[in-house]
Image (cartoon, rainbow, N blue to C red):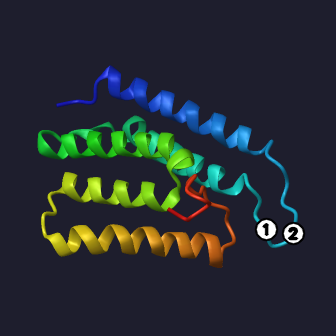
Amino acid sequence: MTTGLGDRTAAVLLLALAVFVFVYSGTLPAPVQDLDPGVGYFPRMLAVLIGVLALVPLIRPHAWERFPRGIVAARVVGTAALLCVYALVVEEAGFVITTVAFVLAELFLLGARKPLTLIVMPLAVSLGLFYLFREVLDVPLPLSGWGGLPV
């Protein structure tokens, strides 16, 4: 099996997206403090990662011959769909409740069925990330409309 025109086209489009994000993130506000990398740092880092991964099917086309199929492909598509829903809902529903729902849905998607795992993991991930970003890194996170509670 060889890499088809569709794979190469997708790689070129992803590469173009990576270049656009990299260039656009350079127009974001400059850092306020000397040690602050600025708001454009993370998008640029992701753009470089996407660009490098987009080059793989162009440089090594046979690396994509074992593309996921069946249940693995369904899980990849399901995860992408969950991430899109998460991005659309997090501002309105709040970080903690959206993250709990996302992790719970992802665990189901990946086949987890133990009740303890389905209770502890979403709560631990959500509250742990909330504490890390909000308290340690001082990153503002969306709160729900329920009296400003971090749910």
Please state the horizontal and vertical placement of residue 89, each as a whole percent of the image. Answer: 48, 43
Instruction: Please identify the quarter of the rendering in which residue 100 is found.
Output: bottom left
Of the pair 130 and 66, the residue shown nearer to us: 130
Q: Nearer the viewer, residue 115 or 45?
A: 115
Judged from the image, the secondary structure of the residue bearing numbered disc 1 is loop
Which residue in the rendered view is the most extreme toward the front? 147
Which quadrant of the view contains residue 118?
A: bottom left
136 vs 144: above or below:
below
Badge 2 amino acid: Gln
Tag 2 and tag 1, C-beta contact below 8 Å:
yes
Residue type marked 1: Asp
Q: Residue at x 64, y 77 (%)?
A: 135
Closer to the camera, 71 or 21? 71
- Residue at label 2? 33
Q: Residue at x 72, y 38 (%)?
A: 24
Badge 1 is on which residue?
36
The x and y percentages for residue 133 are 60, 70
Cα distance between the residues tagged 2 and 1: 5 Å
Q: Residues within 10 Å of mark 2 (few under 14, many from 20)?
A: few
Percent across and percent down for residue 132 are 56, 75
- Does residue 2 appear left or right of residue 86 in this picture? left
Q: Quadrant for the N terminus, please.
A: top left
- Is 117 placed above or below 102 here? below
- Count residues near mark 1 (Cα–Cα under 10 Å), then give few for <14, some for 14-19, many for 20+: few
Q: Is residue 137 visible?
A: yes
Q: Is residue 32 above or below residue 136?
A: above
Q: Does 31 appear above or below 3? A: below
**Count of numbered tags:** 2
